[in-house]
Image (spheres, rainbow, N blue to C red):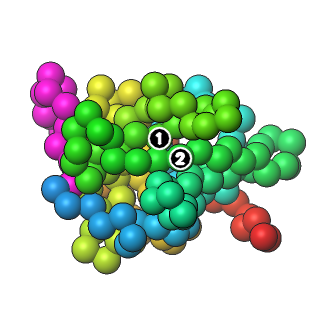
Amino acid sequence: MRRLFVWALGIGCTLTVMSADAPPSTVTELNIDRYLGLWHQIAYIPNSFQKKCVSSVTAEYQKTRKGRIKVINRCLTKRGRFKSAEGRARINPKFEESGKLQVTFVKILTWIWPFGGDYWVLDIDKEYQLAIVGHPERKFLWILSRQTSLSETALRELGDKIAGFGYDPCKIIVSQPGVSKDK
């Protein structure tokens, strides 16, 4: 799978990346209820907070009683243990657009939103099975799917979309598939 993804996005690496001066556009209407549930990380731009993750990376979104979104990120580490982090998400009040979320993993009695990061849904298919999520300054990017893998054609199309959002597809690496965590 790793070779396939590199090859598929390798075509995207030769594309001209759109200007990264302005933030990327997001989906105009994100149906949060349809977005809830389990997503598998297919690929991502490496980041410091996932450095211990080696496979089986998932993000699960659940609605809380207070109307926020509970975020549970999980992955398998090099030591063969599952690591998880719980956070909260909301529509970022600075933008008030459904595709521009803010996520925090910092809690001291209550969730601390000033430490929250931007989590923008750049693209999602009509069936809510495949999503591209990024950061407005292009620091982070994730390709998420309801399935654990994607076809070569889907990966190639995503490489084109990612370049269109101003991200460098050459920075993206495929996530290692892994085992499912029994709940």
Q: In the visual, does 29 lie left or right of 55?
A: left
Residue drawn at x 86%, y 42% as measured from the top left: 79
Tell me, yes or no, if residue 105 can be seen here.
Answer: no
Tell which circle, 2 or 1, labels the residue nearer the N-terminal end: 2
Q: Mark 2 = which residue?
A: 88
The answer to whether 155 is drawn above or below residue 6 in the figure is: below
- Does the stretch in magenta take in 91? no
Q: Which mark is residue 103?
A: 1
Indicate the amino acid at tag 2: Arg
Q: Nearer the viewer, residue 164 or 98?
A: 98
Q: Residues within 10 Å of mark 2 (few under 14, many from 20)?
A: many
Give x and y (percent) for residue 39: 51, 63
Mark 2–mark 1 distance (CA, rounded to whole Å): 6 Å
From the viewer's perspective, is 5 left or right of 124? right
Q: Nearer the viewer, residue 127 or 98?
A: 98
Residue 23 picture quarter: top left
On the image, the x and y values in percent for residue 182 come to 79, 70
Say whether marks 2 and 1 touch (CB < 8 Å). Answer: yes
The local crowd at label 1, few if under 14, some if 14 to 19, many if 20 or more residues have their Cα within 10 Å, is: many
Residue 13's x, y, as percent?
28, 37
- Assign a secondary structure to mark 1: strand
Where does the N terminus fall, quadrant-wise? bottom right
Looking at the rendering, the stretch of residues picked out in magenta corresponds to 11-27
Determine the image quadrant of residue 155.
bottom left
Asked if one can make out residue 36 in the rendered structure from this viewpoint, the answer is yes
Q: Nearer the viewer, residue 149 or 27?
A: 27
Q: How many marks?
A: 2
Residue at the image position 47 percent from the left and 32 percent from the top: 113
